[in-house]
Image: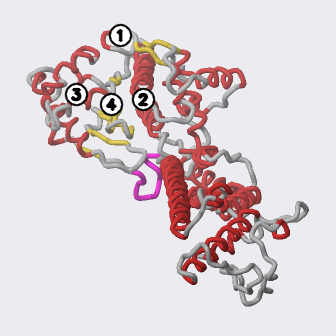
Amino acid sequence: FMSRFQESFHGTKTFIQFRATLNNILNKESGDRTYGGNNNMAQPTATMNKTSAFDTPNKKKRSSSFTPNSSSFLPSSNASHPKPSSISSISSIHSISSISSVSDLGDLLQSSHLQKKKKYDEEETLRIEKEKEIKQKYNQLKKQFNKKIQCINNIFNQAEEENDKGEYDKAMKMLDIDAGKPIEDLDSLLMSNQASYETNSFSLEFFEYQILILEKIKKKREELLEYTHASLVEYEEKEYEKKKLLEKEQEKDSQLSPALSQLLQPITNEEEAMAEEAWSHGYHSEKVVVSLEAGAGRSLVDILGQHTFRLRDGWLVDEVINGYMFLLQERDRKRCSQDPTLKPTHFFSSFFFEKMFEEGGYKYASVKRWGRKVSGGNIFKMGKVVIPVNLSNTHWCLCFVDFDKKTIQYYDSMGGSGNRYLNGMRSYLRDEGKKFVGTDVPSDLLDMETWTLIPTIVHDQQGNVITPQQNNGNDCGVFTCTFGNLLSVDEPLNFSAYDMPTIRTRITLDILNKEIIDARV
């Protein structure tokens, strides 16, 4: 204890007085033992050479004239001594002066120890609480950042599937990174975050995740830049060659067919501005842009801002598809009124097959009354029937019936066979035909065994394109509308995915104008 006390308090006023008091106690108790405790006996003189409990072999012994209260042993006013951290444990000079025995000294030391232990326990409790608070805050930050990373990963997956630069840019904005920044700026950002990671242990995993996702973004940006910039010229040259080759294979003469010519005619500045206005409405806009008599009994169907918004480059909804089928039906009526030799075409809505299969399998009773919607109430008097097919709100296709050729053909811009809908349509015609047995409808037309079902044919044996194919995940509805437009007027499908921007604009204008212009008249 003497050694530890000396190390903590050496050179302080407390040390000097404590040492003097302790020497008095030792001298007193030593005298009691030597002289039998007789107070009348002579006491040892101060000139006796004794070794103090605080003397060390390396220190010079005190003078024989040592007196406990000698001012020569007090530190001078000019001297500076370090204040030990534990001095508060025995800082009361009054407590030290009151010591009269070794027992009192033990009590004082015990009290000092308990005070120090209490203080240590309090500091330890505060440290644990602070550590717990930091850990909770860290876990909360980590949870939030993991959620953000998951969201970014989902966007990356979608971007990879659709090869969409906009999705990559969206992911970068989520990390507050300018999508237009060059790669070297991303390198600087990585280095900055790496430095923070190395100096901030509390946010260690936080920065690890951020660095991980930034590296992923950097990699994607490099791939994207390589595709859209470094190889842009080469890419455009290859695509131009493909388009010219496709046009050469599809063009059988130098003139486009009338309906396709109308679809692909150049867009004027005025038309572009009109289309842009329709596309400017938000994804959730409830504003009525135009109303068409496309409902049952020619009831009005509203085309909202959120519907026209999708016409720019999005996936088309039933209102737009059925609205366009209504406009095609109106065009066909005008054509037939001007040329009575033409057989009419009927356009069912996208809900026809939905009703037919609403219970899982084919059910004629669900669509039995739909035949009444056909002009004259006899579907076998039609020249053609066009039905858009909505595959669970994920894809659009077209079913096309040609009564002159006795064929039911399926057109899918992603190559699907469509056997379910081909068989369903044949079953419908078989059941519908029972109403016309014995009438002027030819019996061979009612015999469904003589009909031909044709799944999607992408190319014929000579390699000619029969069903144009899309090159993204959004254009299927535009392909379906274009299939219906051209097939209903007996024109070949001489268009491609490269024509989609122009055709989208033309469909938008047709809906806004509530009319599809027939280029034949």
Horizontal and vertical percent position of residue 466: 43, 48
Comes first in the chain, label 2 or label 3 = 2
Q: State the mark number for residue 259.
A: none
The amino acid on which the numbered mark 1 sits, given as a three-letter code, is Arg
Q: Could you tell me which quadrant the C terminus lies in?
A: top right
| Up/down of 497 relative to 293, above or below | below
The amino acid on which the numbered mark 3 sits, given as a three-letter code, is Lys
Q: Residue at x 70, y 25 (%)?
A: 268
Secondary structure of residue under mark 4: strand
Q: Residue at x 59, y 29 (%)?
A: 505
The residue nearer to you, when weighing 102 against 516, is 102
Circles 3 and 1: CB atoms closer than 8 Å: no
Residue 333: in sight, yes or no? yes
| Up/down of 99 relative to 484, above or below | below
Magenta range is 458-468
Left or right: 78 as drawn, with respect to 163: right
Circles 4 and 3: CB atoms closer than 8 Å: no
Location of mark 4 (residue): 387
Location of mark 2 (residue): 317
Secondary structure of residue under mark 1: helix
At label 2, counting other C-alpha atoms closer than 10 Å, the crowd grade (few under 14, some 14-19, many 20 or more) is some
